Image (spheres, helix red, strand yellow):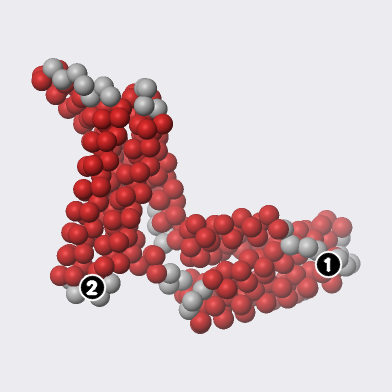
Amino acid sequence: MVSKAIVKQLRQMQKNEITEYHIYTLIARRLKNEQDREILKRIALQEKAHAEIWGRYTGLQIKPNKFKIFYYRVLCFLFGYTFTLKILERKEDRAQKNYALIAEAVPEAEMIIKEENEHEHELINMLNEERLSYVGSIVLGLNDALVELTGTLAGLTFALADSRIISLSGLITGIAASLSMAASEYLSAKADGNKNALKSALYTGCAYVVTVAILILPYLLFAGNRFLALGVMLFAVIFIIFIFNFYISVAKDLSFKKRFFQMCAISLGVAVISFAIGLLVKMFFRIDI
């Protein structure tokens, strides 16, 4: 006889399984790789079967969590299926602990634990998303833009008084640097015999341009207060570093803290040095623009 407490757990697990069935199905539809798509479809059907097993004990037909499905659809659109599947994988790890707790009362739980372990193994082996092949190019563009433009804008903030001139100078510097970085990445990849040299260059250039746009935006929004714009820009730097490193740590199973603090120290350190240089330049040349 299954206790009421376990039935309550089973209802929640049933809802999670049927929700994950819909999530896996949606992700599978987005995949171009036929083999990966078929693996995800099979896993989705297993999740549905698990929900049906729990339904025998709850006696209910539970609807999926629509908000959770929408959330993972957006996550997949923004960050790709590798990141999304890794997040789901973490959820399944926690779910397996619940299965172990009810295994004595529900014999099928052991079979489900085994299948969930197979899911994890298959998911790890199938992840081969194109964008992750260009992480090095993205890091190059992102990191260079953060370091170079953070320093440039911080220096200009003290050297110049007009936020419009600061943003214009930063924009010109950023666009020129992004083209330079993209061209350098193309030539470097081409020299290494990389057949996708153009794609590598595009990833580097796009990462640079997007970062430039985000960092210059505060100077356009807060044109009347360049120091407020500087503060918002530095916050944006930390936010970009946080989001990027969280994405990489999940998608590629790397350490988050070490990479995050390392990038922050470099970018903010350059900003502080450039800030001081800007002050000295203004005092020495007596510039007041």
Which amino acid, by three-letter code, is at mark 2?
A: Asn
Kind of residue indicated by mark 1: Gln
**What residue is shown at x 25% (from left), y 75% (from top)?**
195
Q: In what element is the residue under mark 1? A: loop
Residue bearing mark 2: 194
Q: Position of residue 36 (x, y in %)?
A: 51, 78
Relative placement, left or right, of 185 versus 59 is left
The correct choice, above or below, for 263 with respect to 124 in the image is above
Give the residue displayed 15% in from the left and 20% down from the top.
Answer: 287
Q: Which of 166 and 92 is in front in this view?
A: 166
- Tell me the residue at 84%/72% (across/down): 56
Q: In this view, does 23 lie to the left or right of 281?
A: right
Q: Which residue lies furthest to the left in this view?
A: 285
- Circle nearer the viewer, 1 or 2: 2
Report the Cα–Cα distance between label 1 and label 2.
Answer: 53 Å
Q: Residue 160 sits in which quadrant?
A: top left
Q: Which one is in front, 231 or 21?
A: 231
**Residue 227, x across and y down, in percent:** 34, 23
Marks 1,2: beta carbons within 8 A: no
Q: The N terminus lies in which quarter of the figure?
A: bottom right
Does 147 sit left or right of 254 as displayed? left
